[in-house]
Image (tube, helix red, strand yellow):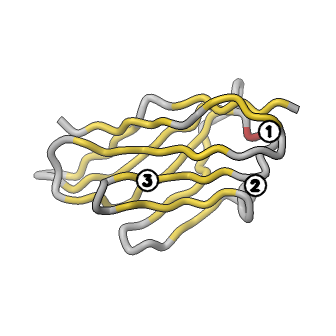
Amino acid sequence: QAQLVESGGGLVQAGGSLRLSCAASGSFFSINVMGWYRQAPGKQRELVARIISDGSTDYADSVKGRFTISRDNAKNTMYLQMNSLKPEDTAVYYCNAGLVSIKTLILWGKGTLVTVSS
């Protein structure tokens, strides 16, 4: 059974950096889109960044220039390098991916908490 597992969250001071990872495992043929979403307390889940299998990327305006999404297709792993973190970046960050199997699977990770202190 395919699954996504995030890692790399934690507590950091404003202006600091963190790197999140999301590893896909299990039975599937390939991965199409992978993305990072976040949900702050009392707010709706929002897209942070996504990356297509060809490497093209898309970012939320609030993180452009500060966050960088990347993926290692050989390792079925996606990364989010977060620099110049702000308190408003505090949220649970979720990994999302579209996996190609006998049928398309849309999976979510369980989330990793990022807390940015001022």
Residue 79 lies, in percent from the top left, at: 49, 52
Quarter of the rendering occupied by the N terminus: top left
Q: Which residue is mark 3?
A: 78
Residue bearing the label numbered 2: 62
Residue 32, given in percent of the width and then of the height, sits at: 33, 61
Name which residue type carries label 3. Met
Going from the N terminus, do you reach mark 1 or mark 2 first?
Answer: 2
Q: Is residue 4 above or below residue 113?
A: below
* Circle 1 crowding by C-alpha within 10 Å: few under 14, some 14–19, many from 20: few
Q: Which residue is mark 1?
A: 88
C-alpha span from label 1 to label 2: 10 Å
Which of the two residues, 30 or 19, is positioned nearer the viewer here? 19
Residue at image point 28% right, 61% down: 74
CA separation, marks 1 and 3? 23 Å
Q: In the image, is 14 to the left or to the right of 57?
A: right
> How would you rate the neighbour count of disc 3 (Cα within 10 Å): few for under 14, some for 14-19, many for 20 or more?
many
Q: For the residues carrying marks 1 and 3, which lies nearer the camera in this image?
A: 3
Residue 40 seen anywhere in this rendered image of the structure: no
Disc number lying in front (3 or 2): 3
Q: Residue at image x 38%, y 61%?
A: 72
The reply to whether the C-beta atoms of the residues labelled 1 and 2 are less than 8 Å apart is yes
Helix or strand or loop: what does disc 2 sit on? loop
